[in-house]
Image (tube, rainbow, N blue to C red):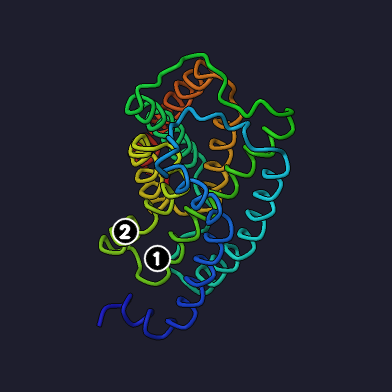
């Protein structure tokens, strides 16, 4: 039996409980959104990625924030069960250049995914406002809700659970992708067919975080995601994507030189 198999055999009650906590977190935070998105596919309703998000009132947003907060509590418990006493789960400090590289790649890929989604929907409207049209504090709260909630509940928790249960094996990553990618896309179903454009973002984010699991990388992802959602026009997002791409390239060069010179652990 492999090391991962022995670990899972001895820790399966904890891992099962962690997986149950994660599923509960996901359903609490995103279940209502998935149900609402599915309703858009009724015969008398047409779903498009350009649907006006301001159709929801402030009260609906507040309920979603509360649901995400409850989900975060459950997801945090799942992560805690996964990382405690699990040497295979890397969550120790991450070199700065690696965090910048991860964040830059994440920002670049997220922008590319959105562009692909809009191309699929044939709805490229450069310069058009992409926020709610509600008071500014609602947009800020929504951005924080998405950045913190999605990256912890939909990305970090399943990655940590899979790593703790099965180790750093390619088969574990494939199984993780099979679960976590649909989980990321499900509450974006209101995009219609354009949701396929988000496959790039969902897949690459998981692969990056699987490779560089640390709280610093997670924090970087949360910041980048929040900033993307705060930007008000596609022009601003294009500029931010260029900044992310440049940062990733520079950080990758610095990291490569450090490895070559033997200055990295």
Is residue 261 visible in the rendered image? The answer is: no
Q: What label does residue 195 carry, if any?
A: none
Q: Nearer the viewer, residue 215 or 46?
A: 46
Q: Which quadrant of the view contains residue 246?
A: top left
Is residue 19 visible in the rendered image? The answer is: yes
Q: Residues within 10 Å of mark 1 (few under 14, many from 20)?
A: many
Q: Which x, y percent locates residue 123?
A: 40, 21
Q: Do tag 1 and tag 2 residues touch (Cβ < 8 Å)?
A: yes
Asked whether, in this view, residue 72 is left or right of residue 195, the answer is: right
The residue carrying mark 1 is: 162
Q: Nearer the viewer, residue 175 or 130?
A: 130
Q: Quadrant of the N terminus?
A: bottom left
Up/down of 133 relative to 44, above or below: above
Q: What label does residue 173 carry, if any?
A: 2
Could you tell me which secondary element the residue under label 2 belongs to? helix
In the image, what residue occupies the spot 42% across and 26% down?
245
In the image, what residue occupies the spot 26% across and 60% down?
170
How far is mark 1 from mark 2, CA to CA?
Answer: 8 Å
Q: Which quadrant of the view contains residue 141?
A: top right
Q: Which x, y percent locates residue 127?
A: 51, 14
Which numbered disc, 1 or 2, marks the residue that appears first in the sequence? Answer: 1
């Amino acid at each position: 039996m492999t090391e991962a198999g022995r670990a899972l055999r001895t820790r399966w009650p904890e891992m099962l409980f962690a997986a149950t906590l994660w599923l509960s977190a996901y359903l609490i935070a995103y279940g209502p959104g998935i149900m609402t998105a599915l309703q858009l596919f009724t015969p008398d309703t047409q779903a498009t990625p350009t649907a006006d998000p301001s159709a929801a009132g402030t009260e609906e947003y507040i309920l979603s924030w509360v649901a995400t907060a409850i989900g975060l509590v459950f997801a945090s418990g799942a992560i805690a069960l996964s990382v405690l006493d699990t040497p295979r789960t890397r969550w120790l400090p991450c070199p700065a250049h690696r965090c910048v590289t991860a964040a830059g790649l994440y920002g670049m890929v997220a922008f590319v995914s959105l562009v692909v989604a809009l191309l699929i929907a044939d709805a490229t409207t450069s310069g058009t406002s992409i926020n709610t049209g509600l008071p500014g504090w609602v947009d800020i709260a929504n951005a924080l809700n998405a950045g913190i909630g999605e990256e912890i509940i939909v990305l970090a928790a399943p990655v940590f659970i899979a790593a703790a249960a099965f180790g750093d094996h390619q088969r574990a990553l494939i199984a993780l992708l099979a679960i976590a990618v649909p989980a990321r896309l499900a509450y974006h179903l209101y995009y219609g067919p354009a949701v396929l454009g988000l496959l790039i973002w969902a897949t690459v984010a998981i692969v990056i975080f699987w490779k560089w699991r640390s709280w610093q990388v997670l924090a970087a992802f949360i910041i980048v995601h929040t900033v993307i959602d705060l930007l008000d026009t596609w022009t601003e997002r294009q500029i931010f994507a260029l900044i992310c791409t440049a940062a990733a390239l520079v950080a990758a060069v610095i990291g490569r030189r450090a490895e070559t010179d033997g200055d990295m652990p």
